Every structure is written in C-alpha cells, then in structure tokens.
Image (cartoon, grey):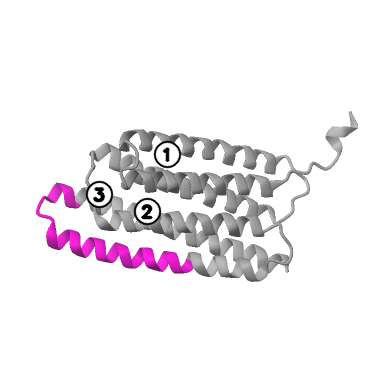
Amino acid sequence: MLKRFLPRETNFFEYFEQHAAMIIEACKAFFDLVHGKADYLTQAANIKSIEQQADALAHRCIDELNHTFITPIDRVDIYQLTNQLDNIVDSVDSAASRIALYGLTEMRTEALLLAEVLRKCSVEIEAAIKSLRKPGTAEDLKRRIINIHQFENEGDIILRTALTRLFKEETDPILIIKWKEIFERLEKVTDRCEEIAYLIEKIVIEAS
C-alpha cells in the first residue's frame, strides 16, 4: 500500500532514445521512398505507421511525466523535448503523405538532396540525444549540435534552389503548387531538427 506514496522514477532518457530511433527509421524510409527503393505508396504507409508509433510513445512519456515526482531534467524540458522529437516524425510523415496523395513518382533533384539532409540530421539527433545521459561527452555533443545547425542551413539553400528552379522550369501550375508544398514541408523538418539542437543545448547548459 505504501508503494504508491513513494516517489516514482522513470527513465525518460530511454523514451528520448526510442523516439530518436524512430526519427532515423522515418527519415531512412523517406530516403528510400524518394530514391525509388520501394513502392512509394507502401513506403508512405510505412512512414505513417512509424508516425503513429511515435505518437503513442509521446503519449506514454507525457503520461509518465504527469505521474513522476522525480525527473532527471526539468519537467518543462522533458515535455518540450518529447513534443519536438514527435514533431519531426510528424513532418516527415506529412511530406511522404503529400507525395503519395499527389501521386508523384518522378522525383525532383532537390527532393533527393533534402532527403539526404534529413537522413544525416536524424543520425546527429540520435547521437546528441544519447549524449544527454553520458557524462564527459560535451565536445562530441557540441559537434553534433553544430552539424545539425549546418544541415539546417543546407536545407535552406536547397529550398531556395528548388523553388527558383521550379518556377523557372516547370510549366504545369498544378505541379508547381504540389512541389512547392512538399519542398516547404521538407525544409520544415530541418527547422524542427534545429529546434531540437537548441533545446538540447539549453538542457546541457542548465545541467552544468
């Protein structure tokens, strides 16, 4: 009976790391989608499944947070980090869903480039998340965060190039609308990756 009155402890780092692994999985699936390594409808459905699993994980983490007395880092930071990790998977799913909805089977060069940026970003995010609970990894964490910022800048450049070429070369106004939306959704993923980097930086500073 007394057990329920004792402080409850949850390993939130495991939640973060599971979420980061799902980001890698979603970005890899999107990379395969745009490179034609699998049927695009099948891959879009696969990414949707990952997104639903990530949502469920986020809900479990927030529920644990609401019932946990002792937390390893600030409660607000746990809440924000959980939501921002989930937002990345949501955004990847959003871009994949649009490609499937619009029936786009011929990929533009910039979509391939953005998919590669996302794939690299996901690797850095997972490494940065894992570094949160490992003492003595400050330099490695700093390098990961710098890399994420650089990838976000690269995403901005690719987006500008993509839109310039799209408006200059494409004559079908419907295709212009479709690709503009997809490019902007993909670039939004890189923005959200950078938001994660800023938050991890904040958490580390507060803990030092």
Quadrant of the rendered image containing residue 57: top right
Q: Name the residue under label 2.
A: 115
Element type at mark 1: helix
Which residue corresponds to the image point at 43% horizontal and 60% vertical from the top-left? Answer: 191
Q: How much space separates mark 2 and mark 3, taking CA atoms?
A: 11 Å
Q: Please indicate whether residue 74 sits to the left or right of residue 30 in the image.
A: right
In the rendered image, residue 99 lying in the magenta stretch gets the answer no
Q: Which residues, given as a range, are shown in magenta?
A: 149-176
Q: How much space separates mark 2 and mark 1, taking CA atoms?
A: 14 Å
View extreme (front): residue: 37
Closer to us: 199 or 18 = 18
Q: What residue type is labelled 1?
A: Ile
User: Which of marks 1 and 2 precedes in the sequence?
Assistant: 1
Q: Please indicate whether residue 5 sits to the left or right of residue 146 in the image.
A: right
Image mark for residue 107: 3
Element type at mark 2: helix
User: Which of marks 3 and 1 precedes in the sequence?
Assistant: 1
Residue 172: percent from left, percent from top: 11, 50
Q: Name the residue under label 1.
A: 47
Q: Are marks 2 and 1 in contact (CB under 8 Å)?
A: no
